[in-house]
Image: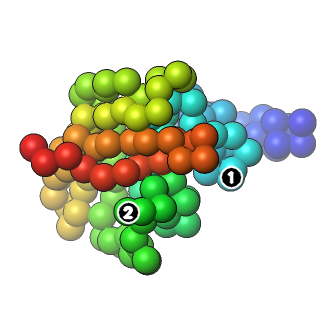
Amino acid sequence: MARRKAREGAGERPAACPCGTGRPYADCCAPVHRGEATAATAEALMRSRFSAFALGDAAYLRHSWHSTTRPERLELEPGTRWTRLEIVETAQGGLFDSAGTVRFRAHYREDGRAGVLAEHSRFAREDGRWVYLDALPE
Ligand SMILES: [Zn+2]
């Protein structure tokens, strides 16, 4: 209630989530980043990780990594700005699956130049929630 009032008072539209669903961040990846909700599908987890990259949330990125592949520490490139996520293809990773893959293209800008990171990622459930496992070789 207080938040909505402040938002209207400021006369601003809520910021769209970086993950590209078109929903406001507060109703999209924010509850997942804060641990108030879990990603329902592997694709939703992928989206939440992309927006964490875009927002520089290294703690969430480690939290959403499988315990067997999680890096000791994660340093985000301060000069890289993640701009757009394209989900190319998903396989399994649904409500009743325990594993799945997502092929995506993550667009970024670095030193004023545009780039794309293409990856085919594997996701798995760990303690019931979706986490990122690793990247498949292309
Ligand atoms: Zn989102």
Whether residues under marks 1 and 2 lie with C-beta atoms below 8 angstroms apart, the answer is no
Q: Position of residue 129 (x, y in %)?
A: 58, 42
Quarter of the image for residue 120 reads top left
Quadrant including the C terminus: top left
Residue type at mark 2: give it: Thr
Residue of label 1: 34
Q: Residues within 10 Å of mark 1 (few under 14, many from 20)?
A: few
**Front position in the image: 124 or 47:** 124
Residue 101 in the image: above or below residue 115? above
Query: Does the residue tagged 1 have its C-beta within 8 Å of any atom of ligand 1?
Result: no
Which-is-in-front pick, marks 1 and 2? 2
Residue of label 2: 69
Quadrant including the N terminus: top right
Is residue 9 among the parts visible in the rendering? no
State how the image is colored. rainbow
Residue 114 in the image: above or below residue 3? below
> Which residue corresponds to the image point at 32% horizontal and 42% vertical from the top-left?
122
